[in-house]
Image (cartoon, rainbow, N blue to C red):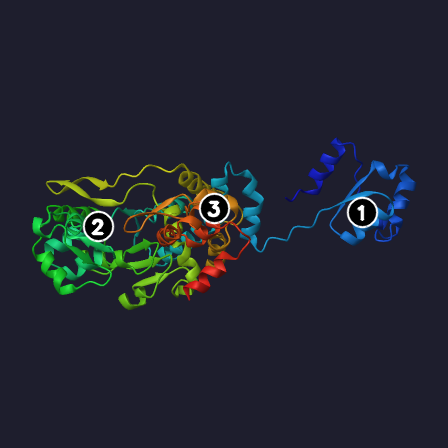
Amino acid sequence: MYLPQTQIDAMLRRCGYPCFDGGFVSCTYGVQKRSGRLFKRFLQETGLTARQLLFIGDSWRADVAGAALAGITAWHLPTPPAPADDAAAFVENRLPQQRSDGESLGFSVLGPLAAAFCQWLHAHRAARPEARLYFLARDMYLMRDVYHTLYPQEETGYLQVSRRSLAPAFLAAGDWATVLAALPRQTLTGAQIAEYCGTTCPPELAHRQFDLKQPDREVLHAFFRQLPRPDAADAVTAYLSAQGIRPGDFLVDIGSGGTTQLLLEQLLQFPLHGLQLSADDRLRTRFAPDQTEVFLFDGKPAPRLYWAGQPMLERLLSQDVGATLGYCAEKGDIVRVRTARQPAEPRIAQIQSGVRRFAAAWRDSVLNGQPIPPQRAIAPFLRLVESPTALQLNMLGDLTVEDGGTYPLAAPQHTAHYLIHPRQARRDFAEARWKIGFLQRAVPLPLPYGKLYLKLKK
């Protein structure tokens, strides 16, 4: 813990210790501390005894050893490293003002990332003022809040869409290839696929299983043809029409392969301009360079360490509600958006509050307008992913994320339990979406779990 000199002096005076600045006294008396002569001279001049003094310094040789030669008790207080940049200094100065551990994490780890991404979005918006920004639910909910904090005069859209909410429109149009693109990459029954697409399944196909990771397209297309037309298809079209989206508008997403952009362009029948936080290899094969841009990692696919924590990042940034399931329409007018039930998580609220506090403090500071480089912005999150503190593990490990199902981030059983049930250890590890955190919680030893995990992934 770092304490400013004024606070140290006040604390020592309350305890009855005199305080003095060693550097000032060195200049005054013209002798050095390391020999102990300075301290002896000081005792002679002040009439104090060595037992009445406590000396605090940042040098073992000059301060601690020098004071000891005069019989004075000394504390070593190393000088903290200077902040790496203005953003780091900004965080360090304001971190003590945060009201909870969750707010502190949001302020220091996600605040710079959210502000930097919104700065980048604003630059694109300023270059094309006729285009509107549409933030995708749920992943870009917090980013939209931060954007409005930094640029309150600008209007933006919030598209409450998901692959599931759009799928009925493709099934109704007989676009089997896009239906398949909208489905989650896992093994589903016929009944589950039909429910996902907003329709019913013939009883004889309800329990048949389909592998969507390695799909047999002909078999799946034949199955799609047997599904009734979903009533929800018209509501999808009505919802998108009400949003006022125009060709070339910006679509803001957390990023990976740009699937949602692909689906929306197919439905709208005109191109959008994707602005992605990150990307994987699929983005380059699906879109031309002028169709989508990426904020992090110089626009290149994100590194393994990022993907090791990406499900956690998505959870921390997302609106804390269930996924968008579809829309209820009456005579073409949208009544409401249907979302899955999901209990609110207080830790998410605290973390997101910290992000908003960072944005507001940055806006009101002299640094407002100064860009935060992408690599600087993502660095605190990558450190958390690779080497979390015990506090961060306890705060985040028990959270759950949606990934074709509901899975824990890193919630292992006790180590002794796994020694007795090794198969369950493998199953739990496979389900964990923050595997580095899982390893560190399961076997709490001072090991470089992040580096070990990345080597295993190779």
Residue 210 pos. (x, y %): 18, 57
Disc 2 versus disc 3: distance between alpha carbons? Answer: 32 Å
Residue 273 pos. (x, y %): 29, 59
Q: Is residue 442 left or right of residue 24?
A: left
The crowd level at tag 2 (other Cα within 10 Å; few <14, some 14-19, many 20+) is many
Secondary structure state at the residue bearing disc 1: helix
The crowd level at tag 3 (other Cα within 10 Å; few <14, some 14-19, many 20+) is many
Residue name at image x 35 percent, y 37 percent: 344
Disc 1 versus disc 3: nearer the observer: 3
Q: Pointer 1 and pointer 3: residues touching (CB < 8 Å)? A: no
Disc 1 versus disc 3: distance between alpha carbons? Answer: 42 Å
Q: Out of 343 and 407, give the one closest to the viewer.
A: 407
Q: Out of 88 and 343, give the one closest to the viewer.
A: 343
Residue name at image x 25 percent, y 41 percent: 340
Residue at label 1? 22
Q: Pointer 2 and pointer 3: residues touching (CB < 8 Å)? A: no
Indicate whether 181 appears above or below 243: below
Indicate whether 172 appears above or below 364: below
Q: Out of 231 and 195, give the one closest to the viewer.
A: 195
Q: Out of 195 and 59, give the one closest to the viewer.
A: 195
Indicate whether 166 appears above or below 20: below
Check the image and name the residue furthest to the right: 44
| Rendered-image quadrant of the N terminus | top right
Badge count: 3
Residue name at image x 90 percent, y 45 percent: 41
**Looking at the image, can residue 265 be seen?**
no
Residue type at numbered disc 3 = Leu
Q: Earlier in the sequence, mark 2 or mark 3?
A: 2
Residue type at numbered disc 2 = Arg
Disc 2 versus disc 3: nearer the observer: 3
Residue at label 3? 393
